[in-house]
Amino acid sequence: MKSLFCIISLIFFISFSGFSQTCITGRVIDSRTNQPLSGVTIKLAEKTLGTVTDSNGNFSFCDIKQAYSNIVISHIGYRAVYRSNVKPNDFVAVSLVESPIELNPIIVTATLTPQSTWEVPAMISVIDSVKLRSQSALNTDNYLRTIPGLYIDRSNGVFSKNAAVTMRGLDGSNRVLILYDGAPMNKTSYGFINWSLISPDMVDQIEVVHGPSSALFGNNAMAGVINIRTKEPLNSPFYGSVTGEAGGFGLYGVRAMLGGKTPVFRKGINIMVNGFYRNGDGYIIEPYTVRDSNSVNSYINEKGLVIKTVIPLSDSSSFYIGGNYYEDKRGAGRAVYLADGSFDAYTTKRFRFGYTAKIEKFDIELYGYAQQEKYYRQNENINTTGDYKLYHTFQTSGDLGFWANASRRIGSNNVLIGGVDVKHGWMDAEDIYRTSTDDLLRKGKVLFAAAFIQDEHSLLNSKIKILGGLRFDVATFYDGLLKVTQPTKNTGFTGDTLADFARSSWKDLNPKLGIRYFPNNWLSIYGSVSTGFMPAKLDDLCSSRKITKGFKLANPNLKPEHLLTYEMGGGIKINSIARFDAALYLSNGSDFQYFVSTGDSIDTGGNEIKPIVKRENITSVRIVGGEISLNVNPLKWLMLRGNFSLNHSEIIKYKVNPLADTTNLEGKALAEVPMRQASAEAIFQNRFVNAGLVWVYIGPQWLDEVNSDEIGSWNTFNLRLWKDFRSIKLTLDIQDILDNPYTDKKGYISPGRFFQFSVTYSFI
């Protein structure tokens, strides 16, 4: 907090100190009403920094060194304006014309170069600022509900421990790579990310690449990539906002953002700080039929801080530094003797730096990142025999990484990119039982290194675009340790255990080839072949412990999963009114990791003898699916969007252990994968009130691997209403309007209808 106070004090000092500069000033109004527009983004085309208009539509852009500048003026719901050859001390008067949402947004995730989604040989989805503004979202993952082929499992809403995000007929969040401003967030310990770490207020655009992308991004990019791009600090002396919120189940919170430009260094420093706090009583997540005296509310208490700083070094280079801090404590819905009952608590610290530059004919990008997560769990329960158990889990895990790539345009039709990627991850966990003598210690480390190359070609006057890529990865697991002292039936070990796991390594080669053809300006067709892989989690490599299925043995020799995908698709667009996209894909997976019984069993103190299982590379799968997406802008004030996805995920090969397995899973569908999904969205924008309505449908899915129990389909309607005044914004979110709660895979129920109201005051 001391460092935060210093930063805020510095921003305040700047806002009142002032310093003489050469500035471009101007004013922006609505062309129809002639009223000033606030919050309009003003950027120099040659730079990444920008500013916004104040409540009177005025703006100023200072520290202008060049004789002439090119300015881009853009605002939600309006057509962007480009002004060239603007001189220092000029006054720029701009009148913006209303325009529907952009149907061909620019992205960077798919190829590392700015390209329209219309040009990339892949299925691409984008959630831009208009869609972000209109959706009822209490967490960042809520925005992804309207993306075709994505399944977001956050059944307890904001009171969920975390969200699981899966894609294209595959289960498991570790098969989807999540990027935060281009840097990976997936933890090597368990493969997934903590979505609560990402503040929705910081999100500027979300880019989703459907299908394997390991040829560029390596591990975890097996089903696809989600890149969360955050807002850039503005080139304004001082600005900010404060939001208060309150909702159902005793939920309340506050959010704040401050930013400004400091006169440090030759071109100054642009900094932005975002903080949030949220607390809620929660609700009982267990169904009425199974509740007892130990059922309690699943409460929440969380807080976070985000800092982002951009330092322009020259007109063609800049340095970036930022960080995240997050703490939470979430009740698990059970309490016996302790006041706070069973709960999970995370403390996460994340740091990132980056450097971009144009050096002669090369565009250079470097970044590094580090994250540390401390996880603390308290679990108390009374088992079926009436025994009280209490234990605590202490786990520290972390990741370090460095990425470097350089791109060069060769002629007018060819761009070549090459780079390296290095990562290091570790985990150190301990389970301490308070009602017995058990103590379990497990730890391990893994090191990744990779090199990649990508080539883009345009042929026949850009009617054909070819994208090819190749990446080679090597990885080593080492320093694996499992130590168990004074065990009892609570942990399943029969005696003291000390296992030093041998070092193991693997390597992987992932190619990709995609072609997109443009027969005319309204039709685009593509085809691609790509591969992806997912490495083993550290928890599976070095951790032996009790799980729901029985007792899990560590497997330090577990190898990556692989996926080969054949895909074809295309798009049709009608001016700026409508765009239709579709994709069909066939994926063949090999070396998939499944739990296999060893044939032995163990007494863990319950009513039943539990099987001993071990995760092995034993299965092959086949996934056949399709996705369609439609965006329509029939009127200036109305935007419509809908999508549908269908997939069939089947195990086609299963290595049966004749001494232990009683069930052959060949021909069975993958568990926890919805067979059908759909969503629709309508955005209404006018001067009286704005509204965003979202409908989400999740089809049936199998609960278990033998396909004996099915989770039924469910759907929800979510509504956001908001009204902007000069400096005030009022927002009402209503989730599950029809109050249609459903039961998830763990047997917990969703909260049903949920209200949240917020008031935001902004200043600049």
Image (cartoon, grey):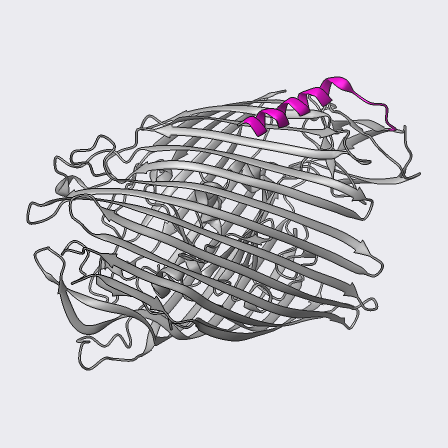
Q: In this view, does 78 lie to the left or right of 300?
A: right
* Residue lying farthest to the top in this orientation: 16
Q: Is residue 521 left or right of residue 128?
A: right
* Residue lying farthest to the right in this orientation: 67
Q: In this view, does 471 lie above or below 575?
A: below
What secondary structure do most residues of the magenta stretch adopt?
helix
Task: Give the quadrant of residue 118.
Answer: bottom right
Task: Identify which residue is drawn at 14% across, 58% down.
Answer: 604
In x, y percent, where is residue 76? 65, 36
In x, y percent, where is residue 471? 60, 71
Magenta-tinted stretch: 2-22
In x, y percent, where is residue 194? 43, 46
Q: Does the magenta stretch include residue 8?
A: yes
Q: In this view, does 36 lie above or below 97?
A: above
In x, y percent, where is residue 547? 24, 58
Q: Is residue 517 magenta?
A: no
